Amino acid sequence: MAEFRIGTCSWADRSLLSSGWYPKGANNAALRLRHYSLHFNCVEVNSTFYAIPAQREIYLWMARTPPDFLFSVKAFALLTLHALPIENLPRWLSGQVKNGKKLVTLYDLPRATRRKLLDAFLELITVLHSAGRLGYLLFQLPPRIHFEDRWLLYLKRLRELTLPLPIAVEVRHRSWLEEGASERFLDFLRDENVAYVAVDEPELSWTVPPLWPLTASWGTVVRLHGRNVSGWRKAGASVEERFSYLYTTEELAQWKDQALLAAQSVPRIFIMFNNCYRDCAVKNALQMKAMLGLAPWGETAVQAKLSPLDGGSSGSEDL
């Protein structure tokens, strides 16, 4: 029996809050998360990419949701080689940035501090994992990171330091899936029991094709970013411009069929919608649930099990 986990890659972004999807009475963080968990059995936490939360927040998330509700967590930006404003760093860390930069990367920190940063982040994630409430920890690389040996070494080091957490890796440049790189990359993921994140996104010269190789025994992940080609091509486009997209039934059916195939090989399938503009993501997530025969609107999302036949720098030393 495969378990389907369907949800969105945020539950509190501003455009969703203004869309009218939440009832008027859900006017605070606790009530919004409780309302969300009436319809979905998982969510991907996006805020952890921008700032490391206080441990108290982790416990509040768990307290406000059913005991089988899962939180998947997007790794802190510096750990995935993104740049971040210095004011987003933990207070204990901001004074250690080299050269007083306002926009910093992992390599603006002393090497010993990089490890402390990872350990501080993982301490929080371990709270979820120990409680049985962690779906996966997502490491999403930026598009500028092309396939190179040093980045493969970096991912290997991350895997070593994050054991035994279930981790998933999303690459955002097609060089990782091209001849000469794909086999090495996917073999690494299989050897380390790391999930490859399949993506649905606009077809551009650099974007990743919609392939879904299964590389982890614990499960698999697909993230649907929408197909807003003009928004992705526009220089300096806002998040809302990039992710304003509502999938059609026909477009979702392609992934539903692949999900049912995946269910014959792995025990848990995450289908996560990142077209987070207004209520596009929640609408499509509910639609996908219905297509897979899962609990509809207004019912708790405990009914998650279906049979597959049911219709419905130098890398390794960076950390």
Image (cartoon, grey):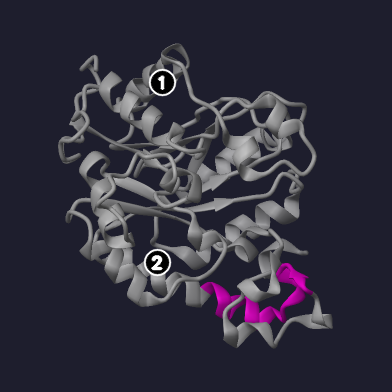
Query: Residue 58 has which mark?
Result: none
Q: What residue is at 56 percent from the left and 40 percent from the top?
A: 187
Question: Residue reaching furthest right?
Answer: 99
Q: Earlier in the sequence, mark 2 or mark 1?
A: 2
Q: Which residue is mark 1?
A: 258
Q: Secondary structure at mark 1?
A: helix
Residue 1 seen anywhere in this rendered image of the structure: no
Magenta residues, as a range?
A: 102-118
Residue 3 location (% of width, % of height)? 25, 36
Q: Residue at x 20, y 27 (%)?
A: 306
Furthest toward the top, the residue is 250
Amino acid type for the residue under numbered disc 2: Ile
Q: Is residue 259 above or below residue 270?
A: above
Residue at left 18%, top 35%? 298
Q: Give the camera-side residue of 222 and 226.
A: 226
Mark 2 — residue?
A: 125
Q: Would residue 34 appear left or right of 161 to someone viewing this image?
A: left
Magenta stretch prevailing secondary structure = helix
The quadrant holding residue 1 is top left
